[in-house]
Image (cartoon, rainbow, N blue to C red):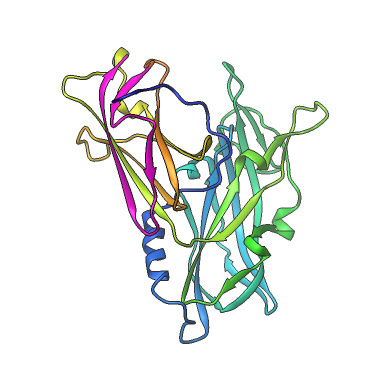
Amino acid sequence: MPSRSSPTTSPRKRRLIGVSLTALAALALAGCGNTQGPSGTTSLSVVLKDAPGDLQKAVVTISEIDLVGSGGVQVLMQTPTTTDLLTLATNTATLVQGAEVPSGTYTELRFKITGACIAVDNGAQPSLIYATTGYDATQCGSGTPGLLQAPSYAQSGLKVTMAANALSLTGTQKILLVDFDVSQSFGQQAGGSGGWVMHPVVTGGDIQATGSLHTSVQLGSGVTLPNAATLDQLSAVLVSGASDTVGVVALSDSASTAVFTADFTFLTPASYTLSLKLPSTVSSVTTNPATPEAVTITSGQQSTAALTVTAAN
């Protein structure tokens, strides 16, 4: 029987990730072989991801990415890239695409960060803005910014923590997913000064066998949402285990078909539950199939979940 789905709470730190179809296609190619390229090199791509946090904006500029091993430093990228990390909660940014590096084992991946700014929720008042010295704080909002303190990552570089403390490049192609955890990387300064401090928590790991989930939601015949609400005000929520939120993705109808969709990608094969997060103007909805709905993610495959809203209050 269909059941009611009520609004979920804000996501806590999640373990994993979603990523672009472009990267997924590259992953499929990567799985075709495990031998070195003809010149003893591996094609390495680096994809940036963010675990969700409570900030409204978190903009960083990455000026260089280096790979460090016994053979020295391999420079992967030297073109500055600026991104709002919060846009990566449901998307990714490809920082390095197919850089040819000598195959072997590397001990460090280093990011050089030349600046950052954040926007902090201030209730009914305008957001509070903080920025590192000399950084363009207008990327995070208007107003006089406070100081965002940060170690000297522009010079020494930020070391990305790797699984097993090493990255092995032994195949013809490798994709590395880097997760910049906003929820742990920015915090209010101790001592009541009102300032903020950036201590980036960044982890990296090979993209191995993963799956994806395509979710679609539509209104049943004659069904409308109360208070003139629309389906694009709802979000799909994917949970692993009892309460570990993997992601919250807003529904969208890019094809204008009245079928609203949300995609979760690069999911570890496992059992999950899918539900809907509702706006404050909608108290509950009834769906068929019932939500929360159990979904199973299978390695290398896209699972689907199609929900029809049969009643709403």
- Please name the residue shown 41% across and 64% down the image: 27
Residue 305 occupies quadrant: top left
Q: Find the magenta span and give its range.
A: 284-313
Q: Nearer the viewer, residue 148 or 203?
A: 203
**Residue with the most extreme bottom position:** 38
Percent x, y of residue 128: 63, 27
Percent x, y of residue 237: 43, 35
Looking at the image, residue 247 lies above or below residue 41: above
Q: Nearer the viewer, residue 221 or 115?
A: 221
Percent x, y of residue 33: 42, 77
- Please name the residue shown 70% across and 36% down the image: 187
- Please name the residue shown 38% across and 47% down the image: 296
Looking at the image, residue 218 lies above or below residue 58: above
Looking at the image, residue 282 lies above or below residue 22: above
**Residue with the most extreme front position:** 1
Looking at the image, residue 23 lies above or below residue 141: below
Percent x, y of residue 104: 60, 78
- Please name the residue shown 42% across and 70% down the image: 30
Q: Quadrant of the C terminus?
A: top left
In magenta stretch: residue 165:
no
